[in-house]
Amino acid sequence: MVKTRDIAILGRPIQLQERSKAQMKGVTIGDSLAYKFYDGEIHGMSLLFAEPKGKIAAPRSLYVTASNLTSLFQLPTVFLLPSCPAYERQRLIDKDVYFVVSDKFAHLPMLLANERIRKTKMAKAMTPVAQYLLLYHLQIESIEGLAARDIENKIPYSYASITLGITCLEDLGLCKKVSDGSKRKVIHFDKKGRKLWEQAQPFLISPVEERIYCDELLDEEHFTICGINALAHYTWLNPDPERTIMMTVKQLRDFRSSNVLVRPNEFDGNIIIEAWKYPPVTNIDTKAEWVDRLSLAISLREDADPRVEGEVERLINETEWKD
């Protein structure tokens, strides 16, 4: 019979199920002797709990143990600690080690993020990270059947942000979180390719936060091409004479404060800069020369030029769906 144990995290009762030795295959002998292991779930997120049998290891050792266990089981690892002084708690937080101390303290950023979103109304539009996840799935690599932890090394967002993005997609009815048979929650899409893209249309947000002009950019960093010139790259449209580039909202703010932009204004210039709400959708180790097709289509859907409208449709029709 599986042994269970009841605990409370910040006043919320949770039932844990102790793992058998067979379920801990691959764990080092040292960790097997030092901890009891449990499965638990909160807010639909599966977690692996590790409870020290004796003396609590140093924060550095806990970090290494958590990293090894998370990599082995693809589950966030949380330490159950009977006590922990304030200075030790801060060292654990600095190393991003998840822990619970009795019912007094908890460092569980991914769960607190989920708690915050569940206290708000259900999403009615995409968040930037949710849109990034969807467009990555449609164009770069399928994330069907993956958990948030599996996606963490694929896109430029933290684990906590990814879990929020998945929750947003689920709220909008674009995906479901389902069990994969090993207590993990993974993503499942009922629709694929063009059908999923069309289902998402009412919820998509323009990636462009702001658009400005300048005469020169005193920075040699690589910038991804967007706007009409990116559309011209993908289709038969002629490019505009102005250089059109994207950067993040933070980059634009930093450039403004450091005088990198020469004569920035809202009307004209040699360079058109679009400040985007999310980075280029691409493989994480790749510098994108052009913004992705679908983000480009979304960014241009308010353009009244019939030539642009026609080429945007061509852009979508020629997309190679990856799911």
Image (cartoon, grey):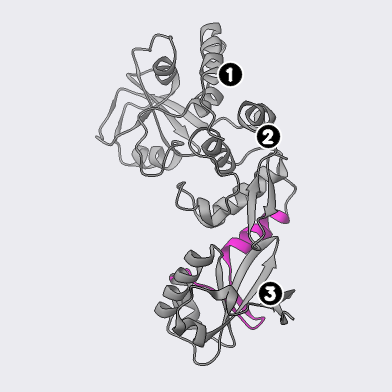
Give the CA separation, mark 2 to mark 3: 38 Å
Of mark 2 and mark 3, the one earlier in the sequence is 3
Asked whether, in this view, residue 172 is left or right of residue 65, the answer is right
Badge 3 crowding class, 10 Å Cα cut-off, few under 14, some 14 to 19, many 20 or more, is: few
Tag 2 and tag 3, C-beta contact below 8 Å:
no
Residue 274 lies in the magenta-colored region:
no
Identify the residue under disc 3. Answer: 10
Of mark 3 and mark 1, the one earlier in the sequence is 3
Identify the residue under disc 1. Answer: 302
Q: Amino acid at mark 3?
A: Leu
Identify the residue under disc 2. Answer: 191
Image coordinates of residue 166 in percent, x first then y, are 62, 48
Asked whether, in this view, residue 169 is left or right of residue 83, the answer is right
Of mark 2 and mark 1, the one earlier in the sequence is 2
The magenta region covers: 95-118
Residue 101 lies in the magenta-colored region:
yes
Image coordinates of residue 84 in percent, x first then y, are 53, 85
Image coordinates of residue 104 in percent, x first then y, are 64, 81
Tag 3 and tag 1, C-beta contact below 8 Å:
no
Residue 60 higher or lower than 283, as above or below: below
Q: Amino acid at mark 2?
A: Lys
